[in-house]
Image (cartoon, grey):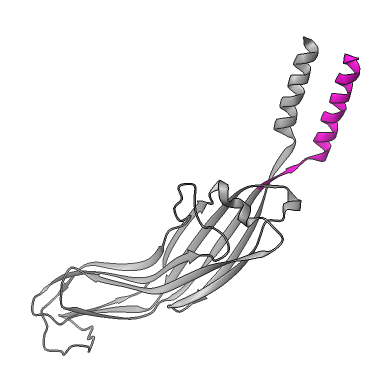
Amino acid sequence: MKLKLMVAALAVAISGATASAQMVVQTMPFSGTPDFDRTLTFNRFDPSLGILKSVIVEFDLNSNGGLAIADNDGEDAGSVNIEFGVGATLSSPDVPLIDNAFQPVVGSLAATTSALGVALAGNVGDVPNDFDPTGPDGFQLNGGNANDNDSGMINSALIGAYVGGTTFDVLVDANNFLSVSGLSGVEQASTPAAANGSVTITYNYNIPEPATLSLLGLGAVALLRRRR
């Protein structure tokens, strides 16, 4: 009975102590003036390192500067909400960017500056398409420093696509973002903000520990000799 208990304990020790958690982190930056597309190239996980357990994707977006104009060309006065900056999405022709709920692993980002409840008078006589930011029927919003980010884990059933000795591409699609809501007849225009950010791919994996395996192996040999 004691021998059986010792064998069982050895099996538990082997299952719980023969792997070491490690990670590989790759971060690729991007920048530009929207609208733009960027292709970021990453290395797939090298299977000689160990066993891939999970893949995490992180998406970070910053915007800075630029300006947005709201010019009321309608007769009615009212208030508007203005949101201005940069929006961005991720896609890939090579690997799935899907989480365990079969949704995009990261959502669409919007790094924006807002002005809420801006009062605009009715048109004071300027013509359509002049985009006059002066009051009382116009307003100019200067873009500030804004950030948005998201992260998620790739569906565990799909991480095999990230393994191998080759590379894969992730595409960043960044666009000028401007929304003016709350009043009809308002013209809008903008000078794009500068955009930058990064995409990070993290591989979490396990590797065997040879020293631990050797010690456990000696223990197994000792048990076998005792049994004989």
Name above or below for residue 166 compared with residue 119.
above
Residue 102 in the image, given as x and y percentages of width and height? 46, 50
Residue 169, located in which quarter of the rendered image?
Answer: bottom right
Question: Is 215 within the magenta?
Answer: yes
Residue 60 in the image, given as x and y percentages of width and height? 49, 63
- Along the horizontal axis of the image, is 155 left or right of 26? left
- Along the horizontal axis of the image, is 21 left or right of 215? left
Quadrant for the C terminus in the image: top right
Magenta: main secondary structure: helix
The front one of 94 and 34 is 94
Name above or below for residue 206 compared with residue 118.
above
Question: Is 73 within the magenta?
Answer: no
Residue 162, located in which quarter of the rendered image?
Answer: bottom right
Name above or below for residue 81 compared with residue 53.
below
Q: Where are the magenta residues, as a range?
A: 205-228
Residue 105 in the image, given as x and y percentages of width and height? 48, 55
Quadrant for the N terminus in the image: top right
The front one of 163 and 19 is 163
Query: Who's the residue at 77% across and 14% down the image?
Result: 4
Q: Which residue lies furthest to the top in this view?
A: 1
Query: Who's the residue at 50% across and 69% down the image?
Result: 172
